[in-house]
Amino acid sequence: MNRSNLKAAAFAAAAAALPCLWQAGATPALAQEPAAKPAAQAAKVERGRYIVSTSGCHDCHTPWIVGPKGPEPDMTRALSGHPESMTLPPPPKADGPWVVTAAATNTAWAGPWGISFTANLTPDPETGLGKWTERNFRETIRSGRHMGRGRPVLPPMPVQVYRNWTDADFEAVYAYLQSIPAIRNRVPEPLPPAAPVAASR
Amino acid sequence: MKPRTLDVLVFAAAAALAAHALLEGGAPAEAALLAPPLPELLSATGLHEPGTTRPRPDHLAFAPQYPLWSDGAAKRRWIHLPPGTSIDASDPDAWSFPPGTRLWKEFAHGRAVETRYIERLADGTWRFATYVWDEDGREARLAPEDGAVVVRADVPGGRYVVPSRQDCLACHEGPSVPVLGFSALQLSPDRDGLAPHAEAREDAHVGLAEMAARGLVRGLPAALLDVPPRVAGRTPVERAALGYLHANCGHCHNAGGALDGIDLALAQDARDPQRSAARTLRSLLGHDSRFRPHGAAATQRIASDGGPSVLALRMRTDNPLARMPPLGVAIADDEGIALVERWIHHDLQRPSETQR
């Protein structure tokens, strides 16, 4: 398989793996807002909530659990990313076209890029986006680099989709993410492709 | 699949994703429409005397005292100011360059491989481009916006990565002024003898005093001509280490810039070097690192004397997802890392002792 085929396969697999079970009713509670907050800001936050709930962020950034009705995002941990407390065995060996594996939480992904863990998008200052500026958020998604200037943002984060947002969309999503309850959860660093394993194939 | 292929795959995917991005700070659409398109050939940027590869004599050659490490490439740099214009240096740490300013930087491994170009347009915006040299060394051609890979036997590893324009912005638009190596601190005649990979300052290289004397730099605080700017290290090793971090990391990690939230201040100031050095030490010693390598139980300070150092670890690692700087480097800078480690282990003290 040549490189571009493999790449396409990886992305297709990632997309296919996305559960589309997000339920409209399961909206995270907005953080307590000061009463005097200008209406414009409230409208922006509401628009951000709408974009987040229709663009699949919870599919990956909220850990999934098996509830009474089957798999669903655990909204008590909304958008807090891959759970820090979860230890994972090494991913199964990739076989043929089955190159991407996701953990049951839908928050850890193994593929040709290594292993990625979905980020904590809540405003916790130490483990989430609490210290990010709107510029950091926009540049991360537009450039596909961490904070616009660091390592590449790894699959399956769909930066190639969200980069088409307008500046106003970025402002709205950022405003919404900063308004949700902060959850302290230190997501592990991604792992590069396992060289020795790959070399032995 | 071999690890190398995987590596290439990851980065090919990432680069493809980054290719069409537009960041804040890039030329606004109207400016892009008004300015003539970037020349396809380096010769058309006006670097050389027509028909030759000799730089025009009215360009000023310069060499920053603390160069950026770029996998061992040899570099030459030039600046052109439109006749009759000058740089406003009244803020010695954020020079204001006149519209029409052009800067070039050539990268060579034996022979030239790439020449980068920065230009300030009439409306004050900046644009970035890079030109890849032909085999025969006569002309260089505009690289695609999303970068390129040059396969050449005489470069380290046989592959030379030409950055995308997005990558230019990642480094050059980190601080408030996008010119990184032509500054009061970098051109100071009080050059640091311990600076890693320092290029000898040749007579042909322009310095601070000459710029001021020729009226090319105006408003520079007189004190900086009497006592040239100097990194405020308490020991020679500390001075060189802080200078190294300034040049290799400070464009991204600076107070008030794009990465303010990380709270890692590695840029040094010409106006108040004591203050910027103290700020750097505080940011290294004063709070926990956000980065926690796999297997590490607790958070650590970014640097601590004698203890493990996230700072050096991030420079030394061969994990491309953790390496600092995150772009522009494929081969770790052993000399620079050795200097930084020596400083951390021998010269850095506990915060209580470093209060000034």
Image (tube, coloured by chain):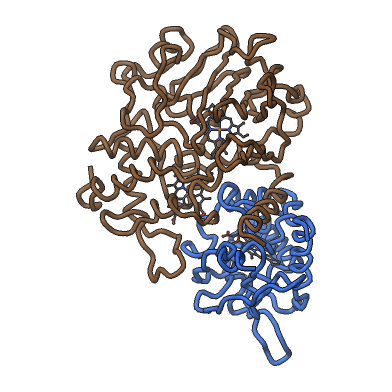
Chain colours: A blue, B brown
Q: Is residue B62 above or below residue A95?
A: above
Q: Quadrant of residue A20?
A: bottom right
Apparent side of residue A7 relative to residue B233 in the rendered image (left or right): right
In this view, the residue in front, B258 or B194, is: B194
Report whether residue A104 is seen: yes
In this view, the residue in front, A20 or B136, is: B136
Residue extending farthest to the left is B353
Residue extending farthest to the bottom is A68
Residue beneath the point at 44% across and 35% down: B247
Residue beneath the point at 20% across and 49% down: B353
- Report x, y in % for residue B216: 49, 12
- Report x, y in % for residue B306: 26, 56
Tell me the quarter of the image containing the N terminus of chain A: bottom right
Q: Is residue B98 above or below residue B343?
A: above
Q: Is residue B62 above or below residue B29?
A: above
Report whether residue B116 is seen: no
In this view, the residue in front, B273 or B115, is: B115
